[in-house]
Amino acid sequence: MAAAASSCSSSIANNRSQSSSTSLSVQLQPPKESGFGILWKRKEDEKAWLGSLAAVQQLIGSLTTAEGLRFGIVVARFNEIVTKPLLEGALDTFKKYSVKEEDIDVVWVPHSFEIGLVAEKLGKSRKYQAILCIGAVIRGDTSHYDAVANSAASGVLSAGLNSGVPCIFGVLTCDDMEQALNRAGGKSGNKGAEAALTAIEMASLFERHLKF
């Protein structure tokens, strides 16, 4: 009887030892999705993604082949203290990227509200590879700001869709004059220059790859 009890105790001890060992080994195993495991998986996913792109045709506009492209610029005269520096930034950028002065036409309109109509007219003329739209809408004390800002944005979008020519939205929509001036050559850069770069890239994309 004593021998049986001893054997039973020994068996229980062995089972406890094995259970403890198993528990310890589980705890020592690194999580399957942590640390180097996640990093390695991400690297493998990235390689697979890049590999899949190798066989896909990619169409990209160029900033180095702007010569010969023609651009129309529609500028709102309202808030000219802002729109004029935006225009100057755009013209300077076009010049840096070898767009000739004779390949640029500037059309002034009274307000940002009228930009879309003129942009569509220029686009449908088929004389330009892209239309750059410049304006400045600054928030006031009434809801007039929302109406003009929304109309300007939808107008430029509709101009591009209806004409089939890229119409670039370079209209500032700011809370106050300080914000607008900062984005017209101030500490936040010149959004007119940035819009001109977009116009060059889109014009190149359409002319080189999307001209049917």
Image: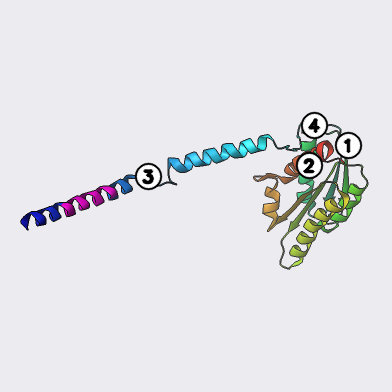
Q: Earlier in the sequence, mark 1 or mark 2?
A: 1
The disc at residue 103 is: 1
Question: Badge 4: few (under 14), some or many (20 or more) residues near its Cα, within 10 Å?
Answer: some
For the image shown, how many numbered marks are present on the structure? Answer: 4
In the image, 32 versus 189, the foreground residue is 32
Locate residue 4, reporting x and y percent.
10, 56
| Residue at x-position 45% and y-position 42% | 37
Q: Residue at x 85, y 36 (%)?
A: 69
Front residue of 185 and 3: 3
> Are the two marked residues, 2 and 3, in contact with CB atoms closer than 8 angstroms?
no
Is residue 76 visible in the rendered image? The answer is no
Residue sticking out furthest to the right = 125
Magenta stretch in the rendered image: 11-22
The secondary element bearing badge 4 is classed as loop
Q: Check residue 173 for magenta coloring.
A: no
Q: Earlier in the sequence, mark 4 or mark 1?
A: 4
Reading the image, the residue beneath label 4 is 65
Image location of residue 14, percent across then percent down: 19, 50
Amino acid, disc 1: Asp
On the picture, is 73 further left or further right than 186? Answer: right
Q: Residue at x 83, y 49 (%)?
A: 75
Question: Badge 1: few (under 14), some or many (20 or more) residues near its Cα, within 10 Å?
Answer: some
Q: Position of residue 174 (x, y in %)?
A: 70, 56
Q: Position of residue 135 (x, y in %)?
A: 79, 52
Residue extending farthest bottom:
142
How far apart marks 1 and 3 lie (CA) works out to 64 Å
In three-dimensional space, the C-alpha distance between marks 4 and 1, rounded to whole angstroms, equals 14 Å
Residue at the disc numbered 2? 202
